[in-house]
Image: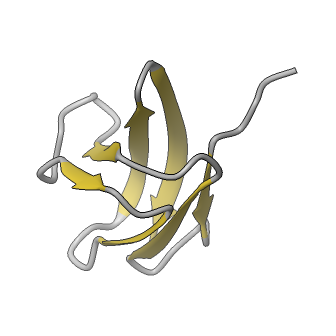
Amino acid sequence: DRVIFFRVYPNPTSGLLFLESTHGGPYQVEVLDVSGKRIMPVFTSNQPDATLEMPDLSGLYFVRITHGQVTETTKVYVY
């Protein structure tokens, strides 16, 4: 079974995402479009919970979160 280290919600979203880490920080967050291009600056959080604002986006995106050697990618729909 796959261990989930992060929870990303709500999905779909109107542009505000909440990130929860089950293992604390630090972790890096990237937002990518469907072609894999990074569309927002990478940010690092040292807290177990973070907020990601995407007010000018609409469509399907990928949120990639890296914590040490673990990387998780979640599809997010922004309306």
In this rendering, would 4 be left or right of 23? right
Q: Residue at x 76, y 30 (%)?
A: 3
Q: Quadrant of residue 35?
A: top left
Colour scheme shown: secondary structure
In this rendering, would 59 be left or right of 24? left
- Which residue is at the far left? 41
Residue 69 image offset from top left, x and y in percent: 44, 18
Q: Residue at x 34, y 57 (%)?
A: 46
- Which residue is at the far right? 1
Residue sitting nearer the eye, 71 or 58: 71
Q: Quadrant of the N terminus?
A: top right
Vertical side of 72 occupied by 70: above or below: above
Count of residue discs: 0
Vertical side of 57 occupied by 7: above or below: above
Residue 49 image offset from top left, x and y in percent: 49, 68
Residue sitting nearer the eye, 39 or 71: 71
Q: Quadrant of residue 79?
A: bottom left
Q: Residue at x 39, y 59 (%)?
A: 59
Residue 52 image offset from top left, x and y in percent: 34, 69
Residue 14 image offset from top left, x and y in percent: 45, 81
